[in-house]
């Protein structure tokens, strides 16, 4: 009983201290995952805590559950658009890319360590995949907004590449356990052909089985959430519990439970269901707790004194992995899909290693593979190096490669209420920021998203039904009715904006327009001039006439008065998607700054003296 009490005390204290340490470390830009890992080492037997922990079985169990919960949360937050945009390229990076990375890294391990090829390739297989937990957390925690294709590629790849890494790890562990022969427990003879066939069939079942369990399980989980009448607090528990059931069933039958639970989360997150906010918040909290516990536990497993003999060879493996293996794999898998050199460079650099390699590193120890503890130590050093070198420099790398987008305005205060699932809509509540577009512009020039309306406005204690005659003012409290996928657009309208001083990415927009919309109507909405000849033409034709056919391409921009139109996509020389940037960036010059200031001053004077209180 005393041990149980002490365990609860120590566990609670470590998690609490990890949270406070993470808050403090964010001021110097240290990756939170690195902080959690370092705290686990400090609490270990060679650290200040002196806690002796070497239960690899418990670590494997906790790692499996924790990683499953993190992938479930990652699936919830992966949009259908992101998956469709990057699925094909991400599958290549998650399969062939892992094999290439594992092969190059394994060859390096064979050179720096006096060991055989199976052991060296096992090291390469364990560190061959990017870590979903590290990618999801480090990208989102640092508040990075990346080019959509780059962000989608990294997130989808990290969610899909676990099956290949796990498959390769188990395959080489089985080979070593059988003394270099066939897979453990296989009925085939130990011949090269039999071994290759067994490996191929095993991988196909892992991937295909993971897809099957994920798609079917996701549909059943969503149906259960929508059909059962429960207390609101039980819906997130039900969703997570059923996700773990799918994970466990897939794993028990030899399929990839990690892929399955990612797809369960993806299915649930991209379809209307009950208790949307409750499930999202609960899953986010569980993912955080899993991340903290996993890194603390993995840090406890390591004895720093045992790492010193293998430190230099492990650093050499880390260097080759970061500087050679990952870039080569990225170039082979993405080079033919139109990625720019800068995009390839960033995707190569964000080949983050995190808790998944450490989790996989426990498998050789549990299977009593020769050199197992040294393998775990090598993997730990590789992960630590990745978090320090790559995790600490993600923001710098995004800026240097030009894949970072300007941050979207954040609403000062937003609350969200779920309506009945059948409605497909939600109620949003905002406090109007003085620097937001809705406060700085007449409402007739603020394009509210389609299928949305203002329900009421509270101002100085008085409630106005609908939009007041004088528009919205700073500190107004606004209730809106909107479809669920318009939250980001409302955040841009109600969030504080500052005049941007740096050139933006070609896809930085505030809203999308219909390319066939009448040019005169668009001009009236956004206050720019068109000629009589252009007035009755589609806005896409206006862009073509002003830019010319040679310059009309995805990313092309056309400045029109106070806004900028951006071509987002084309098919057969026809503009299919068009966006508008309400506050386009200008070069950082004295002239541009004066132009900005003059334009703002004129709009302020015009809105004050030439527009009546009704906004006309």
Image (tube, rainbow, N blue to C red):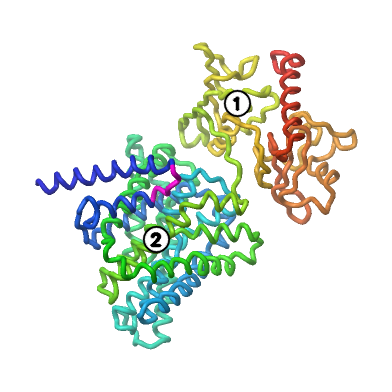
Q: Position of residue 440 (x, y in %)?
A: 65, 23
Residue 550 sits above or below residue 511 on the image: below
Check disc 1 and report its element: helix, strand or loop: loop
Relative depth, front residue between 360 and 274: 360
Q: Is residue 472 magenta?
A: no
- The residue where tag 1 is placed is 435
Please state if 460 lies on the left or on the right of 385 as rendered: right
Relative depth, front residue between 430 and 224: 430
Q: Position of residue 112 (x, y in %)?
A: 40, 76
Q: Is residue 31 magenta?
A: yes
Check disc 2 and report its element: helix, strand or loop: helix
**Which image quarter: residue 385?**
bottom left
Residue 26 sits above or below residue 535 on the image: below
Q: Which mark is residue 383?
A: 2
**Which image quarter: residue 333?**
bottom right
Q: Residue at x 79, y 31 (%)?
A: 528
Magenta segment? 28-33
Proximity of marks 1 and 2: CB atoms separated by less than 8 Å: no
Give the mark count. 2
Please state if 531 lies on the left or on the right of 329 as rendered: right
Which residue is the extreme one toward the left? 1
Q: Residue at x 35, y 47 (%)?
A: 240
- Disc 2 crowd rating (10 Å Cα; few below 14, some 14-19, many 20+) is many
Q: Position of residue 52 (x, y in %)?
A: 19, 57
- Disc 1 crowd rating (10 Å Cα; few below 14, some 14-19, many 20+) is some
Relative depth, front residue between 321 and 368: 321
> Disc 1 and disc 2: Cα gap in Å?
43 Å
């Amino acid at each position: 009983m005393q041990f149980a009490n002490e365990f609860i005390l120590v566990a609670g204290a470590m998690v609490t201290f990890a949270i406070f340490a993470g808050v403090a470390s964010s001021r110097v830009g240290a990756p939170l995952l690195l902080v959690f890992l370092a705290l686990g080492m400090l609490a270990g037997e060679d650290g200040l805590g002196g806690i002796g922990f070497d239960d690899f079985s418990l670590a494997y169990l906790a790692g499996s559950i924790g990683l499953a919960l993190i992938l479930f949360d990652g699936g919830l937050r992966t949009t259908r658009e992101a998956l469709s945009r990057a699925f094909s390229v991400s599958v290549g990076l998650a399969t062939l890319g892992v094999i290439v990375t594992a092969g190059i890294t394994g060859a390096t391990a064979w050179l720096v360590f006096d060991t055989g090829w199976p052991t060296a390739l096992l090291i390469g297989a364990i560190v061959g995949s990017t870590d979903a937990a590290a990618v999801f957390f480090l990208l989102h925690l640092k508040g990075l907004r990346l080019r959509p294709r780059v962000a989608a590629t990294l997130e989808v790849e990290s969610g899909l590449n676990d099956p290949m890494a796990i498959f390769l790890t188990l395959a080489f562990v089985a080979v070593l356990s059988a003394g270099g022969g066939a897979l453990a427990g296989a009925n085939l003879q130990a011949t090269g052909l039999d071994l290759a066939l067994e490996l191929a069939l095993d991988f196909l079942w892992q991937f295909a089985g993971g897809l099957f369990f994920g798609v079917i399980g996701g549909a059943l989980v969503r149906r259960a959430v929508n059909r059962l009448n429960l207390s609101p607090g039980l819906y997130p528990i039900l969703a997570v519990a059923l996700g773990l059931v799918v994970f466990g069933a897939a794993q028990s039958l030899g399929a990839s439970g990690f892929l399955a639970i990612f797809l369960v989360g993806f299915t649930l997150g991209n379809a209307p269901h009950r208790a949307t906010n409750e499930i999202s918040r609960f899953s986010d909290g569980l993912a955080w707790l899993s991340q903290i516990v996993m890194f603390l536990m993995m840090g406890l497993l390591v004895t720093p004194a045992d790492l010193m003999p293998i430190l230099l060879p492990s650093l050499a493996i880390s260097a080759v992995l970061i500087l050679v293996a990952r870039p080569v794999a990225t170039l082979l898998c993405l080079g033919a899909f139109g990625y720019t050199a800068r995009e390839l460079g960033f995707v190569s650099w964000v080949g983050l290693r995190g808790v998944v390699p450490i989790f996989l590193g426990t498998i050789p120890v549990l299977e009593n593979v020769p050199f197992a503890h040294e393998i775990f130590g090598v993997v730990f050093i590789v992960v630590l190096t990745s978090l320090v070198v790559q995790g600490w420099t993600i923001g710098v790398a995004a800026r240097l490669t030009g894949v970072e987008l300007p941050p979207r305005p954040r609403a000062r205060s937003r609350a969200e209420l779920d309506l009945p699932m059948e409605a497909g809509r939600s109620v949003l509540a905002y406090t109007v920021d003085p620097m937001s577009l809705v406060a700085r512009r007449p409402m007739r020039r603020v394009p509210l998203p389609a299928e949305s309306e203002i329900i009421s406005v509270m101002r100085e204690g008085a409630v106005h039904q609908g939009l007041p005659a004088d528009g919205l003012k700073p500190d107004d409290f606004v209730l809106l009715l909107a479809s669920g996928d318009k939250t980001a657009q409302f955040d841009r309208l109600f969030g504080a904006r500052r005049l941007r001083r740096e050139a933006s990415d070609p896809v930085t927009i505030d809203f999308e327009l219909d390319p066939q919309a009448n040019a005169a109507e668009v001009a009236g909405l956004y206050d720019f001039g068109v000629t009589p000849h252009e007035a009755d033409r589609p806005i896409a034709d206006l862009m073509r006439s002003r830019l010319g056919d040679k310059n009309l391409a995805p990313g092309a921009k056309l400045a029109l008065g106070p806004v900028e139109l951006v071509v987002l996509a084309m098919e057969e020389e026809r503009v299919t998607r068009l966006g508008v940037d309400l506050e386009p960036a200008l070069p950082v010059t004295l002239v541009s700054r004066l132009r900005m200031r003059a334009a703002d001053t004129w709009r302020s004077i015009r809105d004050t003296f030439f527009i009546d209180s009704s906004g006309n």
